[in-house]
Amino acid sequence: MRHYKFCPTESLTARSINIARKDVLRRFYEHGLPYSRKLTAHKSCVNYLAFSRHDGRWLASAGDDFRVLLWDFSEVDVVRPAHAFAGPSGNVLALDFSATNQYLYSGGADNVILKYDVSTLRGVGSSSGDGRGSSSFIEQYGDHDDSIRALTCHPYEDEIFLSASEDGKLVLHDGRAGGRMSAAQGTLQHTAEFTGVQHHPVMEHVFATCDVHGQVCLRDTRMAFGPLSGRSNGGIVRVYNTKLSRKSASYLSNPESSSLTFDRDGSKLAVTFLHYYPTVYALSDPHPLAICTGRNAPDGTPISPSQRTYTNSCTMKSGAFGGPGMDEDDMYGAGSDDFRAYVWKIPPLLTLQGLRKEITPHEWYNHEWPDTVAFAEGKWENRYVPFEISTPLARLNGHKSIVNSVAIHPSLLHIVTSGVERQVMLHSPTLSSPAAQNLLPTPSTVRTLQPQDLAAQRTFLRALFGPHPTLHEEIEDDEGEDETISLFDHILREEGEADVFTVRRWGEDSGDSDDSDDEDETMIDVFDTSDSDSSL
């Protein structure tokens, strides 16, 4: 038998090209994303942003004006929405594109999910330059009894998606099922309000959930849905460690998990916590690897205590992984109460695992740990101190109020942000790109939150009790937006920068304990594809 010697030239060449590409992209981001443009068409707060999968042609935006807008990033210069979808009768809180981008799903405060056909727009450019030429939904789903907080589509099937609601229901929708699956078989009832759900991007049966009690779980559709006789433990295959421990507190804290997201290959999971920092987990590790803070400016300079930096205490926020033009997502972005969005570069998982500190209960209780906040599954369990990514890659300015949503384009060097204001901000590291020309420098400073004065009090009262224009009534000046900003300024003064150990107390001795956290979980290997049912 003749033996052939393996020649790695081709793989080495591809690897060299990939390294060179990453070096070029890193140089683009060395100075952050200093250029931007306001994308203006919405009439109220913009709650959620989502790029279409793979090519990122479409940016979907939606919020409190009961409309879903599509912005076409295949245009030479994105200025106006290319299309608008009508139909919501309440604030829109969640969006997601289906596996092939044929459909777009929306959900929100009207408890209804709407399905839109995007495929009919494939040959359409800016057919309705101001986004007013709109079409309606092709199907609606009324399975929930409260606001829909999150939607996530199956990675391969256009007709399958999951929805999570404040009614505690998690619903599996399968347009192919017909009468084969009843509403009961497609519903998982939880004891707490769901705040997020995310399908794994590769493993079709795996998804993650989070709720108002702070619990973050990895689940399997084959165990979570279907006949009751075939279900097991709510489909849970892993519970992530989300409780906080501080030496000065005799109890643990369980921050509410506001949202979660996977990176593109599903190896990382990031959770946005209320009153705490975005936290990064490895899929197969229940203990956190990193937290993302803003203690330093992007140049590494420490932020003084008198200056505002990353916080999340007042609104529902969603983060996003990204790695434009690269084969991995090594960036993560999230909005903040300090009127900015933050983008962090995430080190490799193996690096983070080596940097994480593990502390035994004996060490924890017999040594001083000043200013140390650790994660612990119980008072007498090991403490885990994740690595702190304290220097963001960039801080994105341009907003006048809280930033809630961040989306990173899958291939172009753009990040979009939105929140309390009516505008979507398009950020870029360069003056021009294939989709945006002649961008302007972003202001280097942000608006300062001023103490409440008489004028601010009057604006706040108008926002609460004054007359409000109808959704379709044009507002010629900024008065309506100023009132909204004033309202959230008031909320920030009352609730901003609250101590998570004060507002989210959890104790094993108290009634705040979630019984499900104390159960002995039988960990199931989610990579085991035996006995699978491809219909879910």
Image (tube, rainbow, N blue to C red):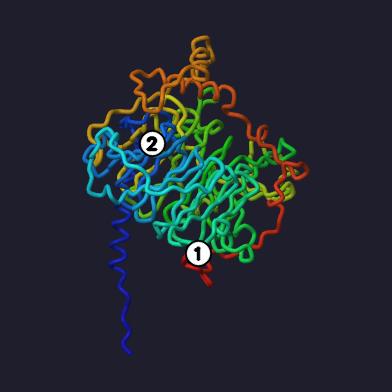
Spot occupied by residue 21 in the image (x, y as percentages of width and height) = 30, 51
Q: Quadrant of residue 193?
A: top right
* Mark before the other along the chain sequence, 2 or 1: 2
Residue for badge 1 = 180
**Label 2 crowding class (10 Å Cα cut-off): few <14, some 14-19, many 20+?**
many
**Label 1 crowding class (10 Å Cα cut-off): few <14, some 14-19, many 20+?**
few
Spot occupied by residue 445 in the image (x, y as percentages of width and height) = 40, 23
In this rendered view, identify the residue nearer to me: 410 or 148.
148
In this rendered view, identify the residue nearer to me: 283 or 53.
53
Check the image and name the residue furthest to the top.
454
- Tell me the number on the disc at residue 35: none
143 vs 424, left or right, is right
Residue for badge 2 = 67
Amino acid tagged 2 = Arg
Residue at 36% in and 41% down: 60
Q: Are marks 2 and 1 in contact (CB under 8 Å)?
A: no
515 vs 526, left or right, is right
Q: Secondary structure at mark 1?
A: loop
Label 2 – label 1 distance at C-alpha: 33 Å
Can residue 207 be seen by looking at this rendering? yes
